[in-house]
């Protein structure tokens, strides 16, 4: 790149390094703003509170990576349960598709962490720097002690909030009470410290500095969401037929006689937009569907005494005076697939047996003969108790006539969350063996919980006797 | 506007992000899949490393994956450079 020669290098340089114009979203009040604040409070409240909650002496939600166990609402998941996580992700993706088709970018406008944390950072910024005009004035002003104090104060609050966010994040992966004690004594482990700082920095960078650029350049969903849109999808639209030609006018003027539409061209819809677009140019990829422009335009319409809804949530069909169909093939298909997979997930969770039995044949010998003339195979069984309480298991084997299972104990106690390895021998009179290799079946069942049992098949090898 | 000019129009932030961000996402997925299948403590025993902290292994594993995936993203960007630019760089104006 550096060797390239062009006719106007300065111009090209300026273009490549053109700094993005900083967006100062104006504060907005109204129904959708209140909805978003409610979503922010609910989601962030959950985020910061959940790791502190306990259930039966166990952190309610803990993705215990060091112990390779996930504790979620009293259930304990092991790496063997990865299937459920994959199913859950499929359900989440399908739900996102369904809601996008129905109501556009609801996720972006109200629930996305980027939106939610940016909203908090904007709130902090407004409390410290003031509203939009004051922020712009402050940025234009030369550096002074006052500006330094205001800007510095804002960043200190941002950083503290980010660090708390990072700490909470790590608290989902390592017990948060212990982490808090360690943090107070400045004794967090090197990687715990690293991830607190990493996530804190990501929060500070994304919500403080990157903001709408995350949605525009980094978000994969933003790139493909339009594929789920159709003419009946709820989107934010400017009613061009009603608004144009736009123009300023006095409040009590007969603007229709002047040939003007309802848009007074106050540009408030542009000023409140967090991604800095003009919704009057039509639906754009940058629009995250936050409805700030709807709120602010409705207020203006109220003040002017015009009907609300010059910018509104509507569908392309409704905008053109056609009816909007909610039940359409796309919606029905998404809903059916979603229901089936969600039902499968619930069924899978309800019938999940929280134990695992693995059988490994002894590799050193195919079989051996005992002193009494029986054929003997040796196996190693691995029993995993995936629950947090201890269980007592009995072991049985079947599949061959006169089969005898020889183990050190009759009943095995497996502590909660433990893995026990058992060497066992299986003996059969060779007259009952019809082939060199037969299938046998081991079953481990908990004595104290009848529904807790698992079976596993294995090969039994022996001499061919007939 | 030609492809080359369009490439130049991409803001710098988008160029940086297009290398570091997709690789971050795929490295995250790779880390989850890899360490779901393999317990780092078992791997450590195979390699003769004792006293391996799992959190440490996950973190290092993630950054190794990220290095790998970001290298691949960077190479993609590198090979996207239009051929004309090479000719011009060597002074062969067409």
Image: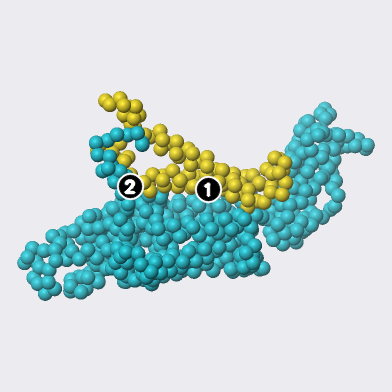
Chain colours: A cyan, B yellow
Residue marked by disc 1? B28
Rounded to the nearest whole Å, what is the CA distance between mark 2 and mark 1?
Answer: 30 Å
Relative to A300, is A427 on the left or the right? right
Q: Can residue A182 be seen in this view?
A: yes
- Quadrant in which residue A128 is drawn: bottom left
> B42 and B1: which one is in front?
B1
The quarter of the rendered structure image containing the C terminus of chain A is top right
> A349 and A329: which one is in front?
A349
Q: Residue at x 48, y 44 (%)?
A: B23
> B46 and A462: which one is in front?
B46
Which chain letter goes with mark 1? B
Residue marked by disc 2? A17
Which chain letter goes with mark 2? A
Q: Residue at x 36, y 36 (%)?
A: A1
- Quadrant in which residue A167 is drawn: bottom right
> A257 and A121: which one is in front?
A121
How many tags in the picture?
2
Residue A345: horizontal and vertical position, in percent?
54, 54
Relative to A184, is A220 on the left or the right? left
Relative to A208, is A56 on the left or the right? right
Relative to A294, is A114 on the left or the right? right
């Amino acid at each position: 790149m550096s060797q390239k020669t062009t006719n106007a290098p300065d111009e090209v340089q300026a273009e490549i390094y053109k700094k993005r114009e900083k967006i100062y979203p104006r504060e907005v009040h109204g129904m959708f703003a209140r909805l978003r604040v409610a979503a922010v409070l609910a989601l962030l409240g959950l985020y910061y509170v959940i790791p502190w909650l306990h259930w039966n002496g166990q952190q309610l939600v803990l993705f215990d990576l060091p112990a390779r166990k996930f504790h979620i609402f009293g259930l304990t998941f092991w790496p063997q349960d990865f299937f459920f996580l994959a199913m859950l992700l499929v359900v989440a993706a399908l739900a996102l598709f369904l809601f996008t088709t129905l109501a556009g970018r609801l996720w972006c406008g109200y629930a996305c962490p980027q939106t939610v944390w940016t909203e908090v950072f904007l709130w902090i910024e407004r409390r410290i720097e003031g509203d939009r005009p004051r922020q712009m004035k402050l940025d234009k002003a030369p550096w002074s002690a006052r500006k330094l104090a205001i800007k510095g104060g804002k960043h200190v609050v941002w950083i503290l909030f980010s660090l708390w966010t990072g700490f909470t994040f790590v608290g989902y992966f390592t017990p948060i009470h212990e982490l808090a004690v360690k943090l107070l004594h400045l004794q967090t482990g090197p990687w715990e410290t690293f991830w607190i700082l990493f996530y804190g920095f990501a929060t500070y960078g994304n919500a403080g500095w990157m903001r709408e650029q995350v949605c525009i350049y980094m978000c994969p969903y933003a790139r493909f969401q339009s594929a789920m849109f159709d003419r009946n999808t709820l989107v934010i639209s400017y009613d061009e037929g009603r608004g144009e030609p736009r123009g300023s006018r006095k409040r009590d003027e007969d603007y229709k006689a002047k040939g003007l539409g309802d848009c007074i061209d106050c540009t408030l819809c542009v000023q409140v937009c967090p991604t800095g677009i003009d919704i009057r140019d039509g639906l754009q990829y940058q629009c995250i569907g936050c409805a700030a422009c709807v709120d602010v335009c409705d207020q203006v319409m109220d003040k002017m005494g015009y009907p609300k809804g010059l910018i509104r949530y509507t569908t392309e069909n409704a905008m053109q005076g056609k009816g909007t169909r909610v039940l359409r093939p796309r919606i029905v298909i998404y809903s059916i697939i979603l229901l089936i997979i969600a039902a499968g997930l619930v069924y899978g969770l309800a019938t999940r047996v929280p134990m695992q039995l693995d059988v490994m044949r002894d590799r050193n010998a195919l079989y051996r003969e005992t002193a009494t003339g029986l054929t003997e195979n040796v196996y190693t069984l691995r029993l995993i108790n995936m629950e947090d309480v201890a269980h007592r298991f009995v072991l049985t084997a079947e599949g061959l006539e006169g089969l005898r299972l020889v183990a050190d104990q009759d009943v095995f106690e497996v502590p909660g969350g433990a893995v026990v390895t058992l060497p066992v021998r299986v003996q059969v009179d060779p007259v009952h063996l019809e082939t060199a290799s037969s299938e046998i079946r081991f079953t481990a069942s908990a004595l104290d919980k009848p529904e807790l049992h698992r079976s596993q098949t294995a090969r039994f090898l022996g001499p061919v006797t007939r | 506007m030609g492809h080359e000019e369009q490439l130049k129009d991409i803001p710098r932030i988008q160029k940086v992000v297009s290398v570091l961000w997709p690789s971050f996402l795929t490295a995250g997925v790779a880390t989850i899949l890899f360490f779901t299948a393999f317990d780092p403590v078992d791997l450590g025993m195979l390699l003769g490393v004792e006293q391996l902290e799992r959190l440490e292994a996950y973190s290092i594993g993630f950054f190794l994956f990220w290095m790998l995936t970001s290298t691949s993203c960077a190479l993609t960007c590198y090979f996207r450079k239009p051929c004309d630019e090479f000719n011009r760089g060597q002074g062969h104006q067409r």
